[in-house]
Image (spheres, helix red, strand yellow):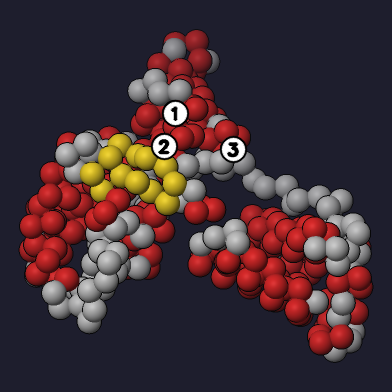
Amino acid sequence: MRRLIHEYLEHLHGERHASPNTVRKYDEALRRFHEFLARDYLGKDAETVRPEDVDATAVRSFLAALTRDGLAKRSQAQMLSAVRSLFRYACLQGTLTANPAQSVRTPKLPKTLPRHLRPGEVENLIEAPSEGVVLDERLARRDRAILELLYAAGLRVSELVGLDWQAVDLPARVLRVRGKGNKERMVPFGRPAAEALRSWLEVWESLRTGAPQVTESEPVFLNFRGGRLTDRSVRNILDRWVDQAAVARGVHPHTLRHTFATHLLEAGADLRTIQELLGHSSLSTTQKYTHLDVERLLAVYRDAHPRARK
């Protein structure tokens, strides 16, 4: 079982080109599953657990243990997905003839609508680096460009920090983005984002020269040492400007991605276009925004129609 997990993670990284974050999450889920099998379900040494030892009851027992541990339904669903994928790979490799996790139902998830910001809130947040007190003007320009681009292009934070200047066409205002599954897409962005990127580019080199090594891939967004910015750093940057702009707490980089999609839908963009811009492989992933728009319409109706309040 340990060898199968190792081979599958190598397959995810080397052949499926999954992001490091995805590989890490699958690694955590599968190690936890393996540990549960050995210690709690089979009562045997972890090294002796074989893929053939696993049946549907073992997978259901794993989910029950996660529930007892207080793990959220969404996290349980993600772990089950990792286990299903592992055994699907085992079947393709000929290690197993059937997937023991295939018949196990995914935990029912609560229906939650993605949070988004209203236009005025977005404007206040994006303007914050230009209006706030800053210690380094260069980093303020960088932060403004980050906020502009997250909202203008609807990028995932991993896509943002992975951007190189070679993938940015400033005159045409288009990005070449490498998303999940190493899939590439072209994403346009507006004039304000282009101006913010040009402003950042003017001071970019003064930070990059302090980097330990200049490589062929020149990252768009740098930390103060001149290295590529990380996902966590972007979240910290956003937290700072959320406080500065007095926007409600709980705004994350993905909030701006949701806001991007919601504002497009409200302005009349069709779902297929939004799907392409977001890089969703399935239209069903994009369709959650229709529920969001219906909720907005219902709220307006309840507030505005005289008979709705009776």
Q: Residue at x 14, y 63 (%)?
A: 204
Going by the image, does 18 lie left or right of 164? right
Residue in front for this viewpoint, 220 or 307: 220
The three-letter code of the residue at mark 3 reads Ser
Q: Residue at x 41, y 58 (%)?
A: 158
Which secondary structure lies at badge 1? helix
| Nearer-N-terminus badge (3/1) | 1
The three-letter code of the residue at mark 2 reads Leu
Say few, some or many: other residues with alpha carbon within 10 Å of mark 3 (under 14 / 14 to 19 / 20 or more): few
Residue 15 appears anywhere in the view? yes
Which secondary structure lies at badge 2? helix
Disc ID at residue 15 = none
Say few, some or many: other residues with alpha carbon within 10 Å of mark 2 (under 14 / 14 to 19 / 20 or more): some
Q: Quadrant of residue 161?
A: bottom left
Q: Which residue is mark 3?
A: 282
Q: Residue at x 81, y 87 (%)?
A: 47
Going by the image, does 19 lie left or right of 109? left
Q: Which residue is mark 2?
A: 277
The three-letter code of the residue at mark 1 reads Thr
Disc ID at residue 273 = 1
Q: Residue at x 27, y 67 (%)?
A: 216
Residue 255 appears anywhere in the view? no
Which secondary structure lies at badge 3? loop
- Asked if the residues shown at circle 2 and circle 1 are in contact, with their CB atoms under 8 angstroms apart, the answer is yes
- Where residue 231 sits in the image (x, y, percent)? 38, 65
Above or below, 206 against 142 in this view is below
Find the distance from the CA under tag 3 to the CA under tag 2. Answer: 12 Å
| Nearer-N-terminus badge (3/2) | 2
